[in-house]
Image: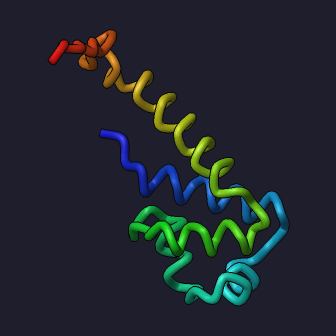
Amino acid sequence: MVLFRRLLGDVLRAQRMRRGMTLREVSAEARVSLGYISEIERGQKEASSELLASLCSALDLPLSVMLREVSDLVALEESLTGALADAPASTEVVASAA
């Protein structure tokens, strides 16, 4: 099973390290406790949309970019675990006339 919070944490940690920032620096900039950010990065805590926006701002990272990276990792993990084999190939939309 794909855990979104684990992949989100992986992306946040990678982005933080790519920018050469410490947890302490992100914590101060985002005004979020260092321990809570650490738990998010380890996939142990879920992050609210407000918290994600604050973390992305502290990392000077557009939220859309972070979410796209997480989405790409989810798709990759799904393909590796065969989760897509169970999903319908397409979704039909049926329009009815009133």
Q: Quadrant of the N terminus?
A: top left
Q: Position of residue 31 (x, y in %)?
A: 63, 89
| Vertical side of 59 occupied by 36: above or below | below
Q: Position of residue 87 (x, y in %)?
A: 27, 19
- Residue found at the far front of this picture: 98
Q: Quarter of the image holding residue 86?
A: top left
| Vertical side of 60 occupied by 10: above or below | above
Colour mode of the rendering = rainbow
Report the front residue among 90 and 1.
90
Q: Quarter of the image holding residue 30?
A: bottom right
In the image, is 1 to the left or to the right of 18?
left
- Residue found at the far right of this picture: 20
Q: Position of residue 35 (x, y in %)?
A: 52, 85
Q: Residue at x 73, y 74 (%)?
A: 58
Q: Residue at x 40, y 70 (%)?
A: 45
In the image, is 29 to the left or to the right of 68?
right
Number of marks in the image?
Answer: 0
- Residue found at the far left of this picture: 98
Q: Residue at x 63, y 60 (%)?
A: 12
Q: Position of residue 95 (x, y in %)?
A: 24, 14
Q: Residue at x 52, y 55 (%)?
A: 8
Q: Quarter of the image holding residue 98?
A: top left
Report the front residue among 54 and 86.
54
In the image, is 81 to the left or to the right of 69?
left
In the image, is 80 to the left or to the right of 30?
left
| Vertical side of 1 occupied by 29: above or below | below
